[in-house]
Amino acid sequence: MGVGCCGSSCSVHREVSARFRKALWVALVVNAVMFAVEILGGLRAGSASLLADAIDFAGDAANYGISLAVLSMGLLWRSRAALAKGVSMLAFGLFVIAKTVWAAFAGTPPEPLTMSFVAFLALLANAGVALMLYAYREGDANQRSVWLCSRNDAIGNLAVLLAAAGVFGTASGWPDLIVALGIAGLAASSGLAVIRQAN
């Protein structure tokens, strides 16, 4: 028996890889565009949670790029890529926690209508990407990390919408800051999960 793959299992693997590669390209473009939209929206609204989510979009775009680069490589390289992504997710979470603590002492309440509009656009983008990647959630550590990023983003967008409603109802910046901390915690815990699976 040869070392290479053969028969129907090899063609199925190539078909899954081709579909996953296409899904990653779509996810990469969507995340890069939404990074720009949320940075502009977060700065305009003065929202820590939108800026946190924007940084997450940038990190996810980079993660999708890494996933594309190692997709055809062996399991060791895919695990190393997943480890790098897990570390970046954890670092993102810690960065946002620090940024939110700073904003709690220095900020003013954000503008809730802009927050709501941008968060809704981001939710549509992330829900679409998460649905597209749902089939790969039980794959290797690399595929699982991609799915977790997308799922976390959709959850984060729902939380930003709730924060916007809280800011509108209370005229306080605390709902925005609390959601930013929640997004950070979700990123950090997912990063740890991916690091464990990659190891």
Image (tube, helix red, strand yellow):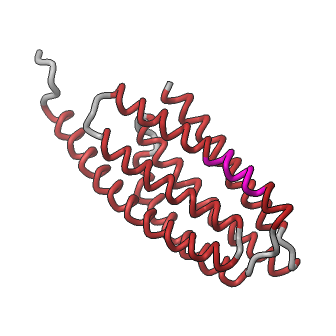
Residue 154: horizontal and vertical position, in percent?
Answer: 57, 61
Residue 172: horizontal and vertical position, in percent?
Answer: 86, 74
Q: Which residues are magenta?
A: 92-100
Residue 70: horizontal and vertical position, in percent?
Answer: 31, 39
Q: Nearer the viewer, residue 187 or 4?
A: 187
Location of residue 132 (image quadrant) = bottom left
- The residue under the point 35% across, 54% down is 24
> From this viewpoint, which residue is outermost toward the bottom?
113
Q: Main secondary structure of the magenta part?
A: helix
- The residue under the point 48% across, 49% down is 147
> From this viewpoint, which residue is outermost toward the top?
1
- The residue under the point 54% across, 38% down is 86
Location of residue 52 (image quadrant) = bottom right
**Is residue 96 one of those drawn in magenta?**
yes
Q: Is residue 85 above or below residue 133?
A: above
In which quadrant is the N terminus drawn? top left
Q: Is 178 on the left or on the right of 48, as rendered?
A: right
Q: Nearer the viewer, residue 93 or 27?
A: 93
Q: Is residue 183 above or below residue 33?
A: above
- The residue under the point 83% across, 65% down is 106
Residue 125: horizontal and vertical position, in percent?
Answer: 48, 69
